[in-house]
Amino acid sequence: MRELTCTHIQPNAAAPAAGAHVIRIDGDRIVAVEPAMPGARRLLAMPALTNAHDHARVTSTTAYGGAGKPLETWIAYLALLPSIDPYLAGAVSLSRGALGGAAAVMVHYTRVQGFTDLPTEVAEVARAARDVGVRVGFAVAMRNRNPLVYGPSEPVLAALSPSARAEVEKRYLKPPLSVGQQIALVDAVASAAANPMFDVQYGPQAVQWCTHELLEAIADASKRTGRRIHMHLLETGTQRAWLDANYPDGILKFLDRLGFLSPRLTLAHCTWARPDELELIAARGATIAVNTSSNLHLRSGIAPVREMVKRGCRVALGLDGSTFDEDDDALREMRLAHFLHQGWAFTTDVDRAAMLRMAFENGRLSVTNTDDGGALAPGMPADILVLDWDAVDHERVRPDLDPQDMLFARSTMRHIHELIVAGRPVVRDGRLLNIDYPAMRDEMLDRLRADMRQNAGLVSAIGELERAVAAHYRSQPPCC
């Protein structure tokens, strides 16, 4: 049993902030939330945040040359990062997320380290998640077409010098597993790694990277097993144009005919989704994970969150490995999304309650495959984020201010006093409690610096590849 007394609580998304309360925790659950006498330390407790779309990358691509590029050329830079121990990679990435306020993280595992078979590797990632202390949804990445561009690779390869072409073919054109092998691999990963805090899911990378046969098999397997599906959709205008050209009846209608759209599905981005498509997503009960800063970094656009809310979509917030300051600050990401989508002048499009619902509640289903939590109430999981209110409200000019004013105006990860996950303290005053994060981070960086020399051939070829890919897309009709 533990008691946590705070001068302020934000009990759920819909309720106003309240005054002093004591939260009683027994094991991994909240058993009571009761008013308390004033005089406790100035803290604000609220449901912990969820990162509903990420990739558990060890560092931003800015660190190795990927800054300021559209997704279609940026994505090639991911291959520059050397492989490192999967436990170390998982621990560093998930620790960074916890320090940013996320108790639950969706990992779409698009980069395999490759030292062992995948089930063994993912078991190490699950061990890292357990040691850090966070909940993880883990989507096994699945793809089998269009390795270089949306369409045939040969025109791009033909634009490269012989040495660059050889390097690109070696790095990017490995034959994919068969559809049956990819479905079976997810089963094997689940057998090796799944546990109550680590949910294994199907992770088709996107329609443009998956054949119809693979998508249909995933839809059938999800229906049969109850496993969730996590997939990118309509992230960029370039993807919008290609999908419109190749699916003239509509990409969402195509997915619906496959049986793909269901409450088991999370769609990352939907930056270029249209109102009728959003209505279909809402009608089928799927979740959309918007990734505000990532879309800005990759020049992908601003998601139509106002329309998503208006059409009744279940919207969650993702970090996508690229928050505004590249620091996994989930509080700042929530605030940035709020500033962009709340509305202008005297019109409110997305109110605070809707934004808090995106941050507290909606993404938990995407990560855990259970619609449980996102509130401070008896019986709820004890996933609690506690802010140092003396640090947030450092002026202390008016004691009667609505705490939500400060929360949305200025809160960041530096204000976090404690993160509690399943009743277990994970972060306190800027420090991970269960692992030595600074030592692991420094070890990881030392390994990356030492091993970057392995990729000298790709470093020399990637400029040519970037120019060839950019030329390919410039020759295509624009999306709108």
Image: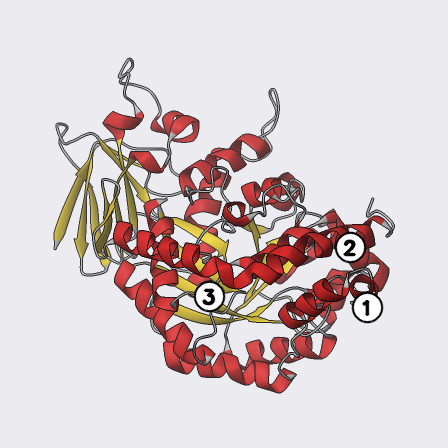
Q: Amino acid at mark 2?
A: Ala
Disc 3 crowd, CA 10 A, few/some/many (<14, 14-19, 20+): some
Marking on residue 154: 1
Q: Residue at x 62, y 41 (%)?
A: 68
Cα–Cα gap, marks 1 and 2: 11 Å
Residue sitting nearer the eye, 54 or 83: 83
Kindly tell me whether residue 328 is visible in this rendering.
Answer: yes
| SS at mark 2 in the image | helix
Residue sitting nearer the eye, 443 or 422: 443
The N terminus sits in image quarter: bottom left
Marking on residue 265: none
Name the residue carrying label 3.
Answer: 83
**Residue 7 coordinates in the image, percent (x, y):** 21, 31
The C terminus sits in image quarter: top right
In the picture, measured across the screen, residue 284 lies left or right of residue 84, that is right
**Residue 448 coordinates in the image, percent (x, y):** 42, 57
